[in-house]
Every structure is written in C-alpha cells, then in structure tokens.
Image (cartoon, rainbow, N blue to C red):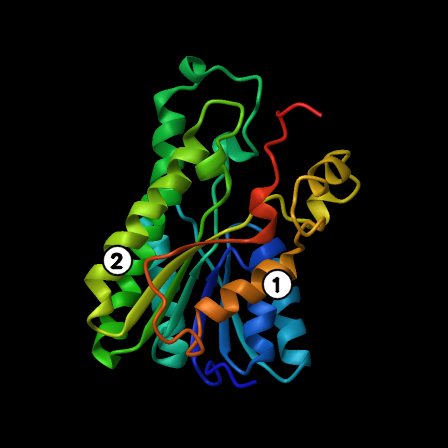
Amino acid sequence: MDIGVRNRVVLVTGGSSGIGAAVAQRYGEEGAQVALTYRTNAAAADTVATQIRDKGGDAMTVAMDLNDPASVTAAVDAVTQQWGTVDILVANAVRWDAGGPPDPSATFEDVPLTEWTASLDANVTGVVAAIRHVLPGMRARRWGRVVLVSSSVAEQGIPGPGPYGAAKAALHGLVRTLAWNAGRDGVLVNAVLPGFTLTDRQAGSPLVDRLTATVPSRRLSGADDVARLILFYGSAANANVTGELVRDGSATAKATYVGP
C-alpha cells in the first residue's frame, strides 16, 4: 500500500533510539527522506541513518537540544538546506524530569521551580519552536503533517512530582489549537499517546507481565507498533483526521502503582 510519503521530507526529533528510531526507519522504508535528531548520542543516530540507507532510503542526522530554541531552529534549517523543506514533523524528543524518568518517591513541593521550568521549556516550548519553524513552509505548499508524541501518563498520571505529565498534557491543548489554526491550509495535526512500550530499556522489567494482563489485547506494544501508528497519521493516507488524541493499545495498561 502506498501511503503517500515517498520523497516527502520528514523530521523525526529524538530519532536515535526507541520509538523515534523505529519511526525514522518506517518512514525510510516507505521512501521518505528522513532527518533524525539527537541531543548527545551522535553515534546511535548515525547507526539508525545507516540502517535506513542500507535499505535504499535517504537519511541525515542533526543535533538538537529541546531546551535551546536556537538549536531547534538550527536543526530545522539544516534539514531545509539539505532537502528544501520539511513536509512532516514527528515531535518525539523528550526531556525527562531531572534527566530521567520521574522519581515516584519525590514529593510535589520538594521539586524546585527550576526543574518545572526546564521540563516545560523543553517538552512544550521546544516542541512549539519546532512547529513554528516548519509550519510556514507547510502552509505555503498547502500540505503538511504534524504528529506530537505524548504519553498515557498525561491522562493517567504517575507517582512523583509531575512536570513530565503536565508537559505532555499541555500538548493535548496544543493539538486542538493547531488543528483549527493550520487545518485551513492543509496541515493535519494529531497526538499519539503510547503507553508502556517495550523497548530495550524495558527488557526484563518485572512490570511487563503485570501490565500485559491489564491490556485488552494481552500484548504490550513495541516501538514498531507505535511507529506504524505515527506513520499513518503523518502520511497522505491520513486524509482528514486532525486534532485527535490517538491512544496506542498499551495506553490502557494500568499505572504501575495500582495494586496487583
């Protein structure tokens, strides 16, 4: 099935590992020109780009730091200088609270406001900066797709202080606003909400069996399952779905702190 991304330029932020890497590879297999960003691990990003090229695709890597608007602008500029445009933006890059997954033992009031600011600046303002820089070109061509990668945490909550979940929830309002603002110009905007996704990081986790039992399909999604979902919403095969929050099958898994 031709989903209409061949020769389209797609920018996947946070494409060096996990869901982002799977998304980049999927677009590459469909004939898109794929730019993937990384913050620190250039070698991992290069590996993903090489895998895309080895399968006959076209790929480039570019450094980007969500906490630095100038870095976001420079990354988009590098892609447009290489290929002339950005047709599809997959905003997957994330900044975890304090540099890692939320600490369930942390109390809300003990988290400094500087951490809130850093998380919101990266996960909201950084995403907005990327969209602002690609949107004018999409409007001019009257075609574009934007997929924001949120999280089931935005709806379920998670133990701990909260900056990450609050930032992801903010993307939901952003999707609704952008759908109305950009839809008239042929730009469709949606958010995908992965749940507990089986990536290398989760391999062997004692939570896997417990969470699997709470999912209707009795199967947790892998990174490629989420990537296929993102691929559809960020393609011409999605002809008129916009402003939606699309939940991956794993998003129904109960939060890890719920009883056995």
- How many residues crowd around disc 1 within 10 Å: few (fewer than 14), some, or many (20 or more)? many
As displayed, is residue 58 above or below residue 156?
Answer: below
Q: Is residue 171 left or right of residue 46?
A: left
Q: In this view, does 16 lie to the left or right of 232?
A: right
Judging depth in this view, the residue of 57 and 205 nearest the camera is 205
Where's residue 208, x and y in %? 74, 40
Q: How many marks?
A: 2
SS of the residue under disc 2:
helix
Corner quadrant of residue 131? bottom left
Dot 2 or dot 1, earlier in sequence: 1
**Position of the C terminus by quadrant:** top right
Q: Which circle marks residue 22 in the picture?
A: 1
Where's residue 37, x and y in %? 49, 60
Where's residue 180, x and y in %? 21, 60
- Give the amino acid type for the residue marked by disc 1 in the picture: Ala
- How many residues crowd around disc 2 within 10 Å: few (fewer than 14), some, or many (20 or more)? some
Q: What residue occupies the far right of the structure in this picture?
A: 204
Q: Residue at x 44, y 35 (%)?
A: 165
Residue 171 in sight: yes
As displayed, is residue 66 above or below residue 234?
Answer: above
Corner quadrant of residue 143? bottom left
Judging depth in this view, the residue of 23 and 238 nearest the camera is 238
**CA distance separating discs 2 and 1:** 26 Å
Q: Which of marks 2 and 1 is in front?
A: 2
Q: Which circle marks residue 178 in the picture?
A: 2
As displayed, is residue 238 above or below residue 158?
Answer: below
Q: Which circle marks residue 115 in the picture?
A: none
Q: Which residue is drawn at 64% across and 48% down?
A: 197
Where's residue 58, x and y in %? 55, 80
Judging depth in this view, the residue of 51 and 186 nearest the camera is 186
Q: Which residue is drawn at 57% across and 33% down?
A: 101
